[in-house]
Amino acid sequence: MSQFIHYKHQQLSSEQIVAYAQQYQDEDMWQLTGQDENYFPFLIGQSLTDFRIVYWSKRHGIMDYADDDPVRYYAFAYWLAENMHPVFASQAEAEQHALAREWPRVE
């Protein structure tokens, strides 16, 4: 298992975050962050400098993804963008997409 340096609660510049995120370059961030079909992650924002990670919960709809390590958060967002996860410009756009697919579905 990989050994990661954690940056919890640290104030880092954007350049530092991008540089430190390289430690996650060969990792499957989906698996590392414990996502599955019940918590499907995607991005809301205009770019990787202005974004937030959210996920679709089968029971609760769209929810914010929280991580107190800004480097791991950025690495996850980058991984999502590189692995064809949906990216929406706004919360409203994401909600319209979810509504069109009848999310959430409570079984």
Image (tube, rainbow, N blue to C red):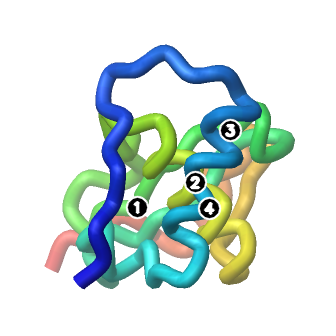
Quadrant of the rendered image containing residue 104 = bottom left
Q: Which residue is mark 4?
A: 22
Q: Between marks 3 and 4, how big is the CA–CA gap?
A: 19 Å
Apparent side of residue 99 relative to residue 86 in the rendered image (left or right): left
Q: Amino acid at mark 4?
A: Gln
**Is the C-beta separation of discs 3 and 4 under 8 Å?**
no
The residue beneath circle 1 is 56
Is mark 2 in CB contact (under 8 Å) with mark 4? Answer: yes
Residue at point 47% right, 36% down?
A: 70
Tell which tag, 3 or 4, sits nearer the viewer. Answer: 4
Relative placement, left or right, of 88 versus 104 is right
- In the structure shown, which secondary structural element does the residue marked by tag 1 occupy? strand
Q: Residue furthest right?
A: 46
The residue wearing badge 3 is 51
Residue 43, position as x, y percentages in the image: 63, 53
Work out whether mark 4 precedes mark 1 in sequence or the reverse, and give the earlier one.
Answer: 4
Disc 4/disc 1 C-alpha distance (Å): 27 Å
Q: CA distance from mark 2 to mark 1?
A: 24 Å
Q: Tell me the amino acid under the disc marked 3.
A: Phe
